[in-house]
């Protein structure tokens, strides 16, 4: 027996070879940039490169956090994510319950497919759709809807106050059809017997939803929420870059850490600032994922990521 | 009870109909606007019920053909190459992770998994790919950075292997003298078709819809895929309009206009729209499988 195992195990160089392309790729694409974190502690000069540039300690961070940008982008990233988690979870559960009630009917499939469709569109296309809705010259809202309601046009791309709501709605529009699938799967996992005995006891539909479905969904809600809490320092670059169409006036309410890093790196060529912001994001993200996972582990070991 | 059930279904149907209408409305606006007459857009804005229909935008695109077809071709090439490469590498990487007889499987799994927890950030990646690997302004920049191996997909495939391919089958083949290559390519891969379908679908969508690699790594417009091409048209019109406002420069009438932007976006989402009815089942299954951790 020992000998057989040894013989079977001895071919491990073939195993390594099968894994090799993936290992090499992850090493280059994911691990090498991790060593780049020290960029954030350097006064990066393009001509000198990564290794030639001088060390500057925490100067980049000090500079970054003295600007109002740091506060604005952190606040926006966190608040948007929190609202997405709260409203998004509620909307997903609502949708999942509605779709489940229709059971195997054909229209349920049609509804689910339609609601999923926006999730497959690229952010660029969604940016064009936003333009069709919100621009002042030819936008659907300013030129058709608002006048028909007897209201004044708004010029959305220069008015900050509407954007938190707009971005939340676009987020829900794109993602709810997708996120509700997980809740549909957990509702499908609830035993039918429970509902049947509740019906025999005279429980109404609403009572069944509030007393059976929602409590049974609690573990799924806790796990998915904690996992998203682990990602609150990361924002969907496409949502915040394409939907506001890069309108400078909107930056106070649309700038997130990801759009800041992009703009610092590519538009203003401020590599040190971008690196500091990116490292701030990575470290906070790492700490949150690890602690969220520790919490999940405590609640339900099987659902922990690691 | 039956009556209550019926009423519930009716209420749910009504609410869902309203939600579906709201969900499809923006897409309908996009499609309808692409068939609108340019003058009507300029005078009255985009509409769901235009007074006059027109295919000028599409005719214009055909006339401008070369650049648009090129961008489309690049998107197709990048999507196909990226998907095939990614699927091959991912299914291979997941195999040793699933084999109990492979002593380093846990270490390898951790190596893959850790990439989900921590990353070096965009700036370091950008410098690595441009300064050291020199992919800037090459077609490789659209394929290699970011998407080729996604840890989540690797774990999905590994779980499929461990749950669906019995050890006894592999051991029997090994006793018959098959080595790991033969076992993997002749036995494991053919059995893994369902999960391969799922991850290649996810990957193809990622590549087709990607504009971020183009944004960071491509300046040369002749290498733009359809998404970046569309972005450039959107930005150019805005840039041109702002310069036209403070100079006497006239906006060229030949310029892609309000309806052409919409038509380009329609073209950009067309493959997704056409394939959607056939793939949505796999997509939903993929999400469910991914959520239920094995």
Image (cartoon, coloured by chain):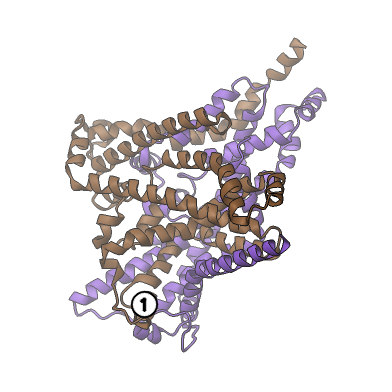
Chain colours: A brown, B purple
Q: Residue at x 30, y 69 (%)?
A: A156
Q: Position of residue A78 (x, y in %)?
A: 34, 45
Report the residue marked by disc 1: B255
Q: Is residue A136 left or right of residue B29?
A: left
Q: Residue at x 43, y 30 (%)?
A: A290
Query: Outermost residue toward the front?
Result: A201
Q: Position of residue A273 (x, y in %)?
A: 24, 42
Q: Residue at x 54, y 41 (%)?
A: A218
Q: Is residue A87 above or below residue A279?
A: below
Q: Is residue A15 left or right of residue A161?
A: right
Label 1: chain?
B
Query: Outermost residue toward the bottom?
Result: B51
Q: Is residue A95 left or right of residue B130?
A: right
Q: Position of residue B146 (x, y in %)?
A: 46, 44
Q: Is residue B123 above or below residue B67?
A: above
Front position in the image: A40 or A97:
A97
Image quarter of the C terminus of chain B: top right
Q: Identify the image quadrant of residue A186.
A: top right
Q: Residue at x 44, y 36 (%)?
A: A30
Q: Position of residue B85 (x, y in %)?
A: 58, 45
Q: Is residue B251 left or right of residue B285?
A: left
């Amino acid at each position: 027996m020992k000998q057989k195992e040894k013989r079977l195990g001895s071919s491990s160089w073939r195993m390594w070879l099968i894994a090799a392309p993936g290992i090499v790729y992850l090493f280059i694409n994911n691990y090498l940039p991790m060593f780049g974190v020290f960029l954030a502690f350097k006064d990066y000069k393009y001509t000198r490169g990564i290794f030639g540039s001088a060390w500057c300690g925490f100067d980049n961070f000090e500079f970054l956090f003295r600007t109002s940008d740091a506060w604005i982008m952190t606040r926006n990233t966190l608040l948007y994510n929190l609202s997405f988690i709260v409203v998004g979870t509620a909307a997903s559960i609502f949708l999942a319950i509605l779709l489940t009630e229709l059971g195997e009917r054909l229209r349920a499939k049609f509804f689910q497919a339609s609601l999923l469709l926006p999730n497959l569109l690229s952010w660029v296309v969604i940016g064009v759709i936003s333009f069709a809705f919100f621009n002042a010259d030819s936008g659907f809202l300013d030129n058709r809807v608002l006048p028909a309601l007897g209201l004044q046009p708004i010029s959305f791309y220069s008015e900050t106050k509407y954007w938190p709501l707009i971005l939340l709605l676009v987020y829900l529009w794109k993602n709810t059809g997708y996120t509700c699938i997980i809740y549909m799967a957990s509702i499908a996992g609830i035993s039918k017997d429970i509902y049947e005995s509740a019906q025999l006891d005279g429980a109404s539909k609403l009572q069944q939803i509030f007393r059976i479905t929602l409590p049974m969904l609690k573990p799924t809600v806790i796990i998915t929420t904690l996992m998203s809490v682990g990602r609150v320092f990361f924002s969907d670059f496409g949502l915040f870059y394409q939907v506001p169409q890069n309108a400078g006036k909107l930056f106070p309410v649309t700038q997130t850490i990801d759009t800041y890093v992009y703009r610092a790196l590519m538009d203003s060529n401020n590599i040190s600032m971008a690196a500091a912001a990116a490292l701030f994001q990575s470290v906070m993200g790492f700490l949150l994922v690890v602690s969220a996972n520790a919490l999940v582990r405590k609640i339900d070991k099987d659902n922990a990521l690691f | 009870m039956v009556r209550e059930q019926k009423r519930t279904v009716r209420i749910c149907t009504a609410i869902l109909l309203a939600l579906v209408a709201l969900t499809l409305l923006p897409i309908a606006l996009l499609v309808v606007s692409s068939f609108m007459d340019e003058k009507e857009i300029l005078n009255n804005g985009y509409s769901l019920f235009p007074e006059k229909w027109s295919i000028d935008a599409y005719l214009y695109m055909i006339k401008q053909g070369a650049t648009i077809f090129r961008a489309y071709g690049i998107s197709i090439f990048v999507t196909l190459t990226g998907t095939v490469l990614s699927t091959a590498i991912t299914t291979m990487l997941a195999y040793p992770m699933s084999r109990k007889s492979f002593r380093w499987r846990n270490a390898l799994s951790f190596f893959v998994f850790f990439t989900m927890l921590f990353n070096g950030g965009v700036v370091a990646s950008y410098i690595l790919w441009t300064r050291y690997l020199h992919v800037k302004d090459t077609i490789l920049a659209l394929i290699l950075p970011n998407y080729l191996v996604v840890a989540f997909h690797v774990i999905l495939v590994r779980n499929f292997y461990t749950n669906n391919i019995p050890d006894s089958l592999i051991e029997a083949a090994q006793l018959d003298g098959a080595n790991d290559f033969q076992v993997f390519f002749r036995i494991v891969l053919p059995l893994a078709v369902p999960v391969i379908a799922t991850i290649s679908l996810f990957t193809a969508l990622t590549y087709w819809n990607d504009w971020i690699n183009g944004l960071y790594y491509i300046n040369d417009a002749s290498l733009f895929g359809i998404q970046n091409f569309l972005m450039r048209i959107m930005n150019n019109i805005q840039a041109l309009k702002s310069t036209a406002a403070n100079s006497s420069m006239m906006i060229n009438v030949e310029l892609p206009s309000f309806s052409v932007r919409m038509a380009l976006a329609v073209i950009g989402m067309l493959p997704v729209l056409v394939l959607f009815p056939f793939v949505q089942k796999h997509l939903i299954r993929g999400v469910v499988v991914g959520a239920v951790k094995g």
